[in-house]
Amino acid sequence: MATVTKTVGASDSADYATISLWYNARRSQPSSGDTEVCILEDGDHDWSSWQGGWADVNLTIKFQAENSHGGVWANGARIVPTGQMSLPSREDDTTIEFIDLVFDFPAAYRPLYLATSSTTTSKTINVTLTRCLAYNASTNSPIIRNGNNAPGVTNITATNCVLEGEGGQWYDVPYSSSTATDSYVVLTACTVRDAIITLQRHTSNSTSNGSVVANGCLIAIDSSMNGGQMVRLTANSYARGGSSVDCITTEAEATHDNWADNSRTNATYGVTFNIDGSAPASGEVSWVGGSGPKYDFSLVENANNLAIGYVTNATMPSGDIEGNVRPGSPDAGAYQSATSVSLTPGVGSLTTTSLTPSVSVATVLTPGVTALSITPSVATAVVATNLTPGLAALATTTLAPSATATSSVFLTPGTVALSTTQFVPVAGTGHSLTPGFAQLVVASAEAPSPPIVDSSTPRSVITQGSWSTTTDFVAGDEWAVTISGAAANAPRVRVQLIFV
Amino acid sequence: MSTQLVTHTPDGVVCAALQDGVHAGKAIVSGTSWDGPVTNEGWCIFDLVEDPQAVRQSVCQAMLTASDISKVYDYFAVADSRLPSSAQASLAATGRASITIDQLLAATGFAPDWSAGLVQSVEQEQGTWSS
């Protein structure tokens, strides 16, 4: 069950320059159950190769684009063949997958041709296309041809694909009247325009069964092509088991039911498809279009576009051909529009705890309407402060005598510090104390004048002073007041500053 | 513009006819030099002075009744033993050799399971058979 991956392309880092070189390097290597992966670099690739030499074991071959085409025909890895890629003699089970590729086929025979040597060994062949753009300019040759002459089952599955043609088939079975395999085609989330599935190529073949199941597809077939019917049937067709769910089609009801085996759910018939990018009338489908062939099959964003939000029953892939996520009620077809994704009006909140804004970092914001809740941070403002001229009361309770007075009338000599933080600032300019007059009132003090009074009655000694130089104060500055004289026993001291 | 004709053992089936300057792939030619020695996996590269279209048409006209077909690979094989000894020695040494178109044609036959009639059938079905 090994998987071996090799790269094919024009770059120096590719393992092989062409698909044919890759095939010749790998053809004899696989064991039963192995997967051979061919990663295709961007650019055109010719799949013309006769791949009849693969080890005949149960084998999966996967062709996968290195990069997505993004829904654009000119981008990514493109299969532009000059001839057929043929696996003509498979006798064991085979799965061939194509992922994210663009098929750009000319009006000539260039198919993937599948066939067997034995007419008796039953086998299962699976061919899957995922997120592929496929255009076939031919009106009579397919992209995939099933010439399996042995019994068994061939399953053809296309998911998130565009299948565009000019009235020719993109898949046909049987190739000959002796083809015996049953063939089942399942289309999911596909956009089909003028591309046919041929379930019976030969009217004389009555040995094989076939059916087509379509889920969430847009189907536009011109009335001049196979009578406007997506599936070509003949008198010996056995389109049993087919069904249609959530499909929009140009086909008439009877035409659609002819291949859908009368089993359809939520199908809308006879719909007008616009390919010119015009706004659709109610009940119509409009594609962006552009210049064709190889149109832009993304949907015109318009509420009238019937395809938008149409799918309610079918199980659709989680993403579309471009990888866009499909919502709960997805659009029909390969492309998911944006119109069907609605936002409920209201206020949204974002958790900003993981955001660390910084003025030095360029922050890229996603365009859109977003309510941001930002917690205010603590800012320190520099406020110009002035001391208001007038009378300021200084708390003196923290003043304590530095020594015990010998008498209750004496103040302790020493220095007390007055903090200017006790001043109440007001808005203004400058940070200066206006030169002026300061007055210190001491409740008790030793001073020659007035005379010392030994009494329990509070005394007052008033000293006066002034300064003449403007002094700038900042937070934390202190103003020292020196009181000298004999020690007092815990006098109350009141200091008054008068600014004029 | 010359051609790199890439063949693969054991049958010497022609697998590609690349233009001069095209890198055959790092699994075939080492490093990033397209004209370097061949590495492994049984590859051989023949360098011819003619361009790929001229090589294809020469082989086609020598082997088929057509003037041109879609490709030279898949259908034909080159038998190393029918090449000049100098070319064989070069192949043994480096996995590639410079040969003339006449030397190529002298060593070319149909690949296993292919014949002139089968080639014609396939090419006519593709619409690439030029009489």
Image (spheres, rainbow, N blue to C red):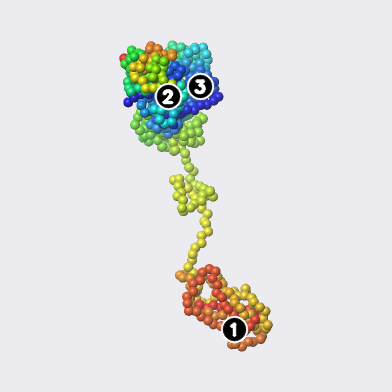
Residue B20 placed where, x, y %? 36, 26
Structural crowding at the residue carrying mark 3, measured as other residues with C-alpha within 10 Å and reported as few (<14), some (14–19) or many (≥20): few
| Quarter of the figure with residue B94 | top left
The residue at which mark 1 appears reads as A461
Q: Position of residue A262 (x, y in %)?
A: 48, 22
Residue located beneath label 3 in the image: A29
Q: Nearer the viewer, mark 2 or mark 3?
A: 2
Q: Does A312 appear above or below B63?
A: below
Instruction: Examine the rendered structure and indicate whether residue A329 appears above or below residue A447.
Output: above
Nearest to the observer: residue A435 or residue A265: A435
Let me know if residue A471 appears in the view: yes
Please tell me which residue lies in front, A459 or A165: A459
Q: How far separated are the C-alphas under marks 3 and 1?
A: 115 Å
Circle 3: residue type: Gln
Q: Position of residue A131 (x, y in %)?
A: 45, 30
Q: Nearer the viewer, mark 3 or mark 1?
A: 3
Q: Which residue is mark 2?
A: B94
Within 10 Å of the Cα at label 2, are there few (<14), some (14-19), or many (20+) other Cα atoms?
some
Residue at image coords 48%, 66%: A383
Task: Locate residue A475 relative to residue A333 in the image: left or right.
Answer: right
Instruction: Look at the picture and state if B47 lies above or below A374.
Output: above
Contact? badges 1 and 2 (CB < 8 Å): no
